[in-house]
Amino acid sequence: MRVVGTWRACDDGVARPVLRGVLFGAQGQPLTEWFLIDTGADQTVLSGTAYFRLGIPGRLPDSGYRLMGIGGASDFVLIATQVE
């Protein structure tokens, strides 16, 4: 697999592999965002900023589901959108 992306310094100053993707908001408006390239990820996670900019209502997950990462657990909501 070949991923065409770039290396970009994140908020913590560490350069990580990313690519640009387009999400579609509640009214179909496109929103361009940087996505971390993680070929082993189980799901796609958006920032809170991207979530609010999309204007898509979220729903709480069923009980028992947790979003876990290297920094521990985090609260989250589920949304339906498309990524190009």
Image: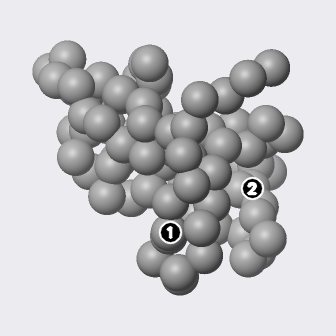
Q: Amino acid at mark 2?
A: Arg
Q: Residue at x 57, y 55 (%)?
A: 7
Residue furthest to the right in view is 40
Q: Residue at x 66, y 43 (%)?
A: 37
Residue holding disc 1: 9
Q: Could you tell me residue 82's position as x and y percent? A: 43, 19
- Is residue 37 at all visible to an observer of this figure? yes
Are dots 1 and 2 in contact, CB under 8 Å?
Answer: no
Report the quarter where the N terminus lies.
Answer: top right
Measured Cα–Cα span from mark 1 to mark 2: 28 Å
Q: Between 36 and 72, which is closer to the camera in this rendering?
A: 36
Residue 63's label in the rendered image is: none
For marks 1 and 2, the one nearer the N-term is 1
Q: Is residue 3 left or right of residue 48?
A: right
Q: Is residue 14 left or right of residue 47?
A: right
Q: Amino acid at mark 1?
A: Ala
Q: Residue at x 63, y 60 (%)?
A: 16
Q: Between 63 and 29, which is closer to the camera in this rendering?
A: 29
Q: Between 69 and 79, which is closer to the camera in this rendering?
A: 69
Q: Is residue 65 left or right of residue 32?
A: right
Indicate the secondary structure of the residue bearing disc 1: strand
Neighbor class of circle 2 (other Cα within 10 Å; few <14, some 14-19, many 20+) is few
Q: Residue at x 25, y 34 (%)?
A: 31
Residue furthest to the bottom in view is 12
Residue holding disc 2: 66
Report the quarter where the C terminus lies.
Answer: top left
Neighbor class of circle 1 (other Cα within 10 Å; few <14, some 14-19, many 20+) is few
